[in-house]
Image: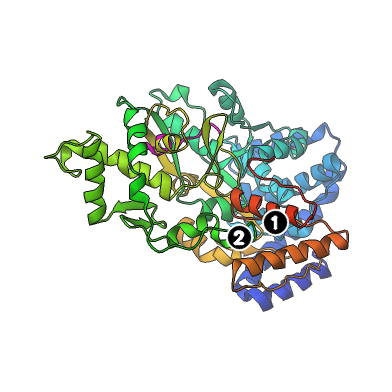
Amino acid sequence: MAGSILEKGLSKLSAVFGTANERQIKKILPILDKVGTLEPRYKEMTDEEMPAETQRFRERLAAGETLDDILPEAFALVREAGRRFLNMRHFDVQIIGGVVLHQGEIAEMKTGEGKTLVATLPAYLNALTGEGVHIITVNDYLAQRDAAWMGRIYKGLGLTVGAIQHDMDDEDRRAVYGSDITFGTNNEFGFDYLRDNMKFEEGGFVQRKLKFGIVDEVDSILIDEARTPLIISGPAEEATRLYGQINGLIKPLLIEGDEEEEPASPDDYVEGGKDNISKKNYEYLIVDEKSKTVNLKEKGVVECERLLRRTGELENDVSLFDMSSITLLHHVEQALKAYVLFEKDVDYVVKDDEVIIVDEFTGRLMSGRRYSDGLHQALEAKERVKVQEENVTLATITFQNYFRLYEKLAGMTGTADTEASEFQEIYKLPVVVIPTNVELIRHEYPDQVYKTEREKINAVIDEIRECQEEGRPVLVGTTNIEKSEKLASILRSRKIPHNVLNAKNH
């Protein structure tokens, strides 16, 4: 059963994470023993007998047995299917990870420990109920890849598998959701839920009841994006003429007080980019980047009303804050947000005369998605592209509230333990740290902090050059498109070969 490496891993866990995590792992070891004992039985099975075993499991569940009752046999069967169809036998620590996920917990597994393979164990077991399992990934590519790759195990065991893709119609989506195992992104699952709730008849729904979800990169989806709203909007009746008008007259309101100098060269890296927005002191505006709000100061209201009256948008005896001016105020606020809080090539790009949102977490373009409440129209006016019809919100939900709807939820990541308290408090999901299959040989160095951005960038470039001289590839991550392109500009100026991968170059 568990060999010396696993025992060493448990010993290290005791020293690093205390005994609570170790006790949780030790509770699973008897199950691991049973799975190991059953393994020879399934090695003798033919490929044709495996789907029949799945049917027997389902009959036992219908007769009153529980998923926990058949877990050791089901896991042993999946382990053999992995060996047979993928030439990948689940390690003991992966079996432990599978049990943790089945229990509705978060398994922290280090990079390279095979999280994708781990998910096959609880996904197969829970799919035996016939109520469907959702495996949530961070992008369409991974959903499609994992459905095809791990699908060989599921299909070999007689289960059906599908992957939701963004261009599918309702009929195709309904068919995929009818599969035993459904792969897809958090966005696709969330938007399908919203669309279903806008339908008048249950027969038109594409999703089934949300029974069991396994979230890959759970910290990114459940913590980083927790409060990100999913919004479905529709066209509003009011005209969009005002966006262009307001855009043409608000620029005097953007006067800054004390601000840092503009960058003189690509090396002046710190002065560019969104990180500097909140440091600006505006003459007429109060900016709160954290809450994403821009408000007019008292003198800003006076100046704004003067500008609006000069162009005839506001009558002389009417205030900007009168009820009759509410639409005008809305347009002013959205235009100010567009200029102050949203930056081209950071929050969005302009491509083919369209404003396209950049996903702040993945750096990917979100084609077809639009900001709501007129913000997207304000950005279109700012960038002088065609202003599309304004939309109003028809349905919305945050990722946090969507994932709470699952009857059972589990997750995998390489870095959950640092956010364990948040997972417990928000989702009631405990985090279990799984020992590595082999001793970790990676060296983790402490963070290096520099006094200025320029010093930091010079250190990054020195390290890039050092890696290249040694023939080692190096991946440099930045927080947005603009910073990646500025860094690339510095590398070009120093004749350091490189490739740029971002939402504009992919």
Residue 346 is inside the magenta segment: no
Number of numbered discs overlaid on the protein picture: 2
Place residue 59 in its image quadrant.
top right
Q: Nearer the viewer, residue 190 or 213?
A: 190
Q: Which residues are magenta?
A: 367-377
Please give the name of the residue rendered at 74% of the width and 40% of the height, measured from the top-left corner.
150
Inspect this view and state whether residue 483 appears: yes
Q: Position of residue 407 (x, y in %)?
A: 50, 45
Amino acid type of the residue tagged 2 in the rendering: Tyr
Q: Is residue 282 left or right of residue 218?
A: left
Q: Nearer the viewer, residue 244 or 286?
A: 244
* Label at residue 490: 1
Q: Position of residue 89 (x, y in %)?
A: 82, 50
Please report contact status of discs 1 and 2: CB closer than 8 Å, yes or no: yes
Residue 374 is inside the magenta segment: yes
Q: Is residue 295 left or right of residue 226?
A: left
Q: Position of residue 240 (x, y in %)?
A: 34, 28
Main secondary structure of the magenta stretch: loop
Question: How crowded is the residue under tag 2: few (<14 C-alpha within 10 Å), some, or many (20+)?
Answer: many
Amino acid type of the residue tagged 1 in the rendering: Ile
**For the view shown, which residue lies furthest in the bottom direction?**
15
State whether residue 122 is above or below residue 55: below
* Label at residue 269: 2
Q: Is residue 328 left or right of residue 294?
A: left
